[in-house]
Image (cartoon, rainbow, N blue to C red):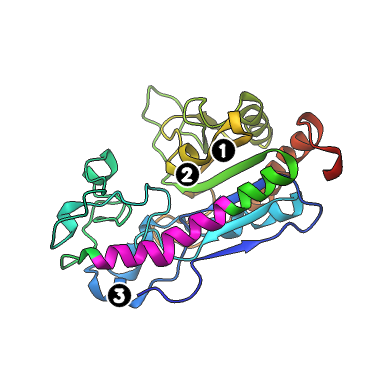
């Protein structure tokens, strides 16, 4: 059973801007009930984790952003899913009628409570009780999303808008798609639904100036967080940022590599570039200047 806070929020180090940076998949505290029910080693469970992303994005606070990251691991609860994307194959009793048990993510075993890790290995040696899943959602998922929603709403109330950057890591992709080089970074805006073109353009520009190969909406167009919170017509833009793990870590032993410091420094430049764009190109109310 999860005990303690489900997330951590770090406030801006300088004048606040309507900018929130989130990392929902980098939690690395593995509770006893998960470890006892799992047939996998701790190392195998961590392969679903966006290792170190909360640290890589930490300098966003210097650009005026609030940073939120989940403390619970993705293998325990996936905060980038609908709240009740639950897999009937995982439970020893019928699911509630409100559960979404037919989504493509559930079919793949990667619902809100995952049945498998990213490599496809089953997580559990036994079936779970529905109460276990609901308890995880109440203790982890719902508090995280309440906090994220509060951060967004506070900025909309103060500035009239909010920019949300939902940050993830991805397995390094093989350059086998039409002969094109594998991207280092994938930016996703749900095919234009969750963000306006200006935000995407400034993020692409800074990443490319720093030497990164950037793809747009392929193979990742944005997950639940991007779809749920990105409402440009209401002043909230959400952009998902996926970074290849090989840029900063050894994907076999999960340890940082020599590129770690460079990526963290480059991400601080990306956040600074987006902050400059917000300050210069986005109309902020005079009281917030």
Q: Earlier in the sequence, mark 2 or mark 1?
A: 2
Give the image quarter of residue 92: bottom left
- Quarter of the image for the N terminus: give it: bottom left
Q: Residue 238 got which mark?
A: 1
- Residue at x-position 64% and y-position 40%: 163
- Residue at x-position 29% and y-position 70%: 41
| Residue 137 at x, y percent in the picture | 37, 61
| Residue 113 at x, y percent in the picture | 30, 57
Q: Magenta segment range?
A: 131-149
- Residue at x-position 21% and y-position 58%: 122
Q: Which residue is mark 3?
A: 33
Under circle 3, the secondary element is helix
* Disc 2 to disc 1: CB gap under 8 Å: yes
| Residue 282 at x, y percent in the picture | 75, 31
Q: Which residue is mark 2?
A: 225
Residue 143 in the magenta stretch? The answer is yes
- Separation of disc 3 and disc 1 at Cα? 34 Å
- Separation of disc 2 and disc 1 at Cα? 8 Å
């Amino acid at each position: 059973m999860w005990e303690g806070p489900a997330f951590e929020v770090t406030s801006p180090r300088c004048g606040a801007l309507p900018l929130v940076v989130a990392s929902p998949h980098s939690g690395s505290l593995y509770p006893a009930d998960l470890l006892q029910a799992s047939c996998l080693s701790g190392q195998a469970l961590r392969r679903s984790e966006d290792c170190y992303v909360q640290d890589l994005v930490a300098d966003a606070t210097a650009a005026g952003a609030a940073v939120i990251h989940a403390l619970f691991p993705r293998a325990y609860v996936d905060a980038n899913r609908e709240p009740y994307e639950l897999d009937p194959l995982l439970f020893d009793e019928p699911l509630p009628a409100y559960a979404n048990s037919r989504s493509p993510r559930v079919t793949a075993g990667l619902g809100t409570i995952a049945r498998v890790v990213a490599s496809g290995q089953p997580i559990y040696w036994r079936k779970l009780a529905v109460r276990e899943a609901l308890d995880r959602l109440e203790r982890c998922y719902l508090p995280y999303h309440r906090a994220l929603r509060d951060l967004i709403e506070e900025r909309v109330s103060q500035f009239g808008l909010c920019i949300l950057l939902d940050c993830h890591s991805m397995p390094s992709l093989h350059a086998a798609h039409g002969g094109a080089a594998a991207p280092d970074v994938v930016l996703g805006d749900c095919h234009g639904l969750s963000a306006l073109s200006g935000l995407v353009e400034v993020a692409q520009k800074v990443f490319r100036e720093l030497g990164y190969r950037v793809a747009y909406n392929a193979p990742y167009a944005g997950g639940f967080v991007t779809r749920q919170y990105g409402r440009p017509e209401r002043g909230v833009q959400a952009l998902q940022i996926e970074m290849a793990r090989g840029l900063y870590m050894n994907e076999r032993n999960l340890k940082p590599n020599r590129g770690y410091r460079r990526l963290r420094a480059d991400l601080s430049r990306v956040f600074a570039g987006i902050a400059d764009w917000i300050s210069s190109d986005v109309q902020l109310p005079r009281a917030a200047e």
